[in-house]
Each structure stands twice: as C-alpha cells, then as structure tokens.
C-alpha cells in the first residue's frame, strides 16, 4: 500500500471516518511490519498536534508493540482505560469497538455513533423566589437577584453569590435553585458556604440565615464547603436523611430515582441521621455513609473521596464501577436517557479516569475500548447492547 494512501487511511481512522472495510485494511497493514506501527505513531502524533481534543493521553508505544503478540487476552470484564489506550489505537480487534461508525450499506443496519447536542436542554436553570416568581438564570443579561426591592445576590455565568448575612434583615426567606440535567452550578450562600450543585438537583436555602441554626434542603447531588460557625450549626436536609456539621467539606447524593443516598466526608466532622430509623452515625474524613431508602439502614465505610467528589473538577473517576452506575452518572451530566438491550450489561465493571468533554460520544468511545459493550446514540437516547 502506497504511503500517500496509508496516510490518508490513518487520518480517516483517527477522525472516526473509516468504514469496516477500511478498518480491516488498516489492521492487516499494521500487523505486517513493525515499521508500519512506527509510521502509524508518527502520523498519530502529527494528528494529535493539529487536533488536540481527540488525543488519547499516555499512549505507550512499547506496550503497543508487545500487545500485538497477545491479542488473545482481550476478554476482560474490568477496563483500565489508560493501559488500554496505549494499545487500542493500533489493534483492529479493539479499535473496532471504538470506531464502529460504519455507514448503512445495502440497507443493512450497522452500529453508528451520532454526536449528541448537549446544548439542547429540555429544562431551564431556574431560581424560584419565596413569592413564587421564577428567574431564568441562563438568560443573558441576568446579573443580580432582587427580592422585595432588595438586591440579595450577584449572578455570573453558572454562579451566584448571596450577600445578606451581615444585613439587618431578620426574616428567613427561602429561595429554591433548580439545576437541570446537563448543567452544573456554583452557589455561595450568605454565610460564605460554597456549594457545587450537580446536574438534576434542587437546593432550597434561605437568603439570610436567622436563628440558632443554618438549614438548607437538597434533592440530588452537591458538594459543600461549609463556613465555620460554632454558634450556628449547619444542617443539610435530604428527603430521607439529615447531615449536621459545624464546618467541613463533603458531598451529598440523594437522587429520588436511586435506591440509596450517600454522604461522603472530605474534611471536618459530620453526623448523619436517618429519617426512617433515627439512627445516627458520626463520620471522619475519608468515610462515607450509605443509607437504604426502603428500610433506613445505614452503612459506614472508608472510601477514596476522589471517586465521589471529582465531578466538581470536571472529571470522572471510576474504580470497578458498574456500567449502570457510570451511565446513570453520564446521563445526568449530559441530559440523556439510557436504553438497555441486555440487562446483564449493567453489571459489567470498568475502572478509569477521564475528563468531561463537550460531547458525550467521546466518553463512550473510551468506555467502548473493550469488546464488552456497544453504544448507539440516537437523539437523547443511548442504546446499550452486546458487541
């Protein structure tokens, strides 16, 4: 095969534009000669320099060469993305799982990944005032929040800062923030407490804390850095549990459609109480409590907090996580629906760390580096099936 032709084929492969026939040709060419593999990496490095958004990190060429001799060891249930990324790009057997884009030829249905438009939202980023008035925070020109002719908060892009704690206003007036699927929001309360609000989450909070405690209500997931105040303890009320804290950093996750709630402590000390059984558990940094919504049973365990709090830094970290857990997480982040063609695939486990890209199809490509699963995106639906 002439160099000009193979260079064009490699470029089409890296751009996800190859057909199945072209993939087979590329695979055969790579296996013919070790020099072909070296040439491939030269082309890939040039492509990555021009298209950095499509670069696979930490590619190890030595691993790629060794992997050619051990293709048989592919049927694994746990995927370590950084290791596989080092070899997958040169193997048809694995690359087929990533770039199975093929077109429909002779009206035969083939797997195809269609980019989802994550910018289209079915819901809005809304702040509801005590009067019932709703303010669309995602509309251009919204720079401040006024309640009863008093400016209570400043608004920036995906962020809002309340500033009434030192004022003479002594009535406790609540606002409610609704963050839709596919969005995140940063909220600073009047006492200085910082809240990273995840997708599909509601937070109800007072404009100014009054009395002997600070209380907010959360449905969904949020990470909090609570301002210290030894006089006014801070309480987070979820539908089934309550967290009490004086000053700390922690993540709460209480989505209505999940069987369990979880609270993960990063720093400080908190107590978690079940609303069902009134059982109370004290947490130390690095501990997590899981609460069964049906019976209120609480289980405390030691965890790597990065696995549960990294979302606020724009990345996903999974460790032997089920595919169901991973896809449910991504579905909220990107406002998608999951359709399972085989329920057993929910239990397939994966491990890895990936950055949050603008388009969900790039994340699915990383997960699809294994032969265990295939993805098809149709509008807002992700169809999960066997390879």
Image: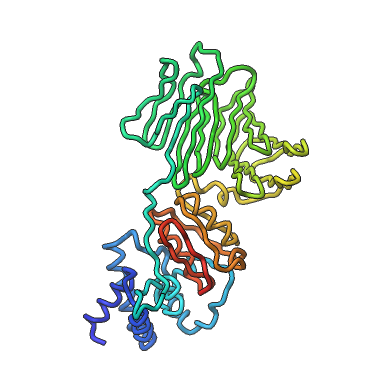
In the image, farthest residue toward the top: 168
Picture residue at 39% right of the left edge, 29% below the top:
155
115 to the left or right of 204: left
Picture residue at 35% right of the left edge, 62% below the top:
54
Asked whether residue 178 appears in the rendered view, the answer is: yes
**Measured along the vertical axis of the image, is residue 310 above or below residue 351?**
above
Q: Of residues 36 and 27, which is closer to you in this image? A: 27
31 to the left or right of 2: right
x and y percentages locating residue 207 in the rendered image: 51, 22
**Measured along the vertical axis of the image, is residue 73 above or below residue 134?**
below
x and y percentages locating residue 184 in the rendered image: 45, 42
**Measured along the vertical axis of the image, is residue 104 above or below residue 250?**
below
Q: Of residues 248 and 335, which is closer to you in this image? A: 335
x and y percentages locating residue 249 in the rendered image: 58, 37
274 to the left or right of 257: right
x and y percentages locating residue 136 in the rendered image: 40, 33
Quadrant including the N terminus: bottom left
Quadrant position of residue 289: top right
Q: Of residues 78 and 23, which is closer to you in this image? A: 23
In the image, farthest residue toward the left: 4
Q: Of residues 266 and 325, which is closer to you in this image? A: 325
Asked whether residue 62 appears in the rendered view, the answer is: no
Picture residue at 44% right of the left edge, 47% below the top:
182
């Amino acid at each position: 095969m002439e160099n000009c032709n193979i260079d064009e084929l490699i470029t089409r492969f890296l751009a996800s534009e190859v057909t199945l026939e072209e993939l087979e040709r590329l695979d055969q060419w790579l296996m013919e000669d070790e020099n072909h593999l070296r040439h491939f990496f030269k082309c890939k490095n040039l492509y990555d320099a021009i298209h950095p958004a499509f670069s696979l990190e930490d590619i190890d060429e030595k691993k790629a060469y060794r992997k050619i001799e051990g293709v048989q060891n592919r049927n694994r249930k746990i995927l370590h993305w950084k290791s596989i990324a080092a070899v997958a790009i040169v193997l048809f057997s694995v690359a087929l799982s990533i770039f199975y884009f093929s077109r429909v030829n002779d009206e035969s249905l083939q797997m195809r990944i269609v980019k989802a438009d994550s910018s289209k939202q079915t819901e809005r980023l809304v702040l509801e005032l005590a009067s019932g008035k709703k303010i669309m925070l995602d509309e251009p020109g919204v720079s401040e929040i006024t309640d009863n002719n008093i400016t209570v908060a400043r608004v920036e892009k995906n962020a809002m800062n309340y500033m009434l704690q030192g004022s003479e206003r002594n009535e406790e007036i609540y606002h409610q923030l609704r963050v839709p699927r596919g969005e995140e929001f940063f909220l600073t309360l009047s006492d200085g407490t910082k809240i990273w609000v995840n997708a599909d989450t509601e937070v109800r909070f007072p404009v100014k804390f009054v009395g002997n405690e600070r209380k907010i209500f959360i449905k969904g997931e949020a990470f909090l850095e609570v301002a210290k105040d030894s006089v006014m303890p801070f309480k987070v009320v979820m539908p089934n549990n309550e967290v009490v804290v004086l000053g700390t950093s922690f993540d709460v996750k209480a989505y209505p459609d999940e069987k369990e709630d979880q609270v993960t402590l990063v720093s400080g000390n908190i107590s978690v109480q079940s609303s069902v059984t009134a059982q109370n558990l004290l947490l130390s940094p690095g501990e997590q409590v899981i609460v069964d919504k049906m019976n209120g049973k609480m289980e405390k365990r030691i965890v790597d907090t990065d696995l549960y709090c990294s979302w606020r830094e724009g990345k996903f970290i999974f460790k032997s996580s089920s595919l169901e857990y991973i896809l449910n997480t991504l579905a909220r982040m990107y406002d998608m629906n999951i359709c399972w063609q085989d329920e057993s695939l929910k239990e397939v486990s994966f491990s890895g760390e990936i950055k949050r890209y603008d388009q969900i199809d790039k994340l699915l490509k990383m997960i699809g580096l294994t032969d265990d699963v295939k993805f098809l995106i149709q509008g807002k639906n992700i169809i999960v099936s066997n390879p």
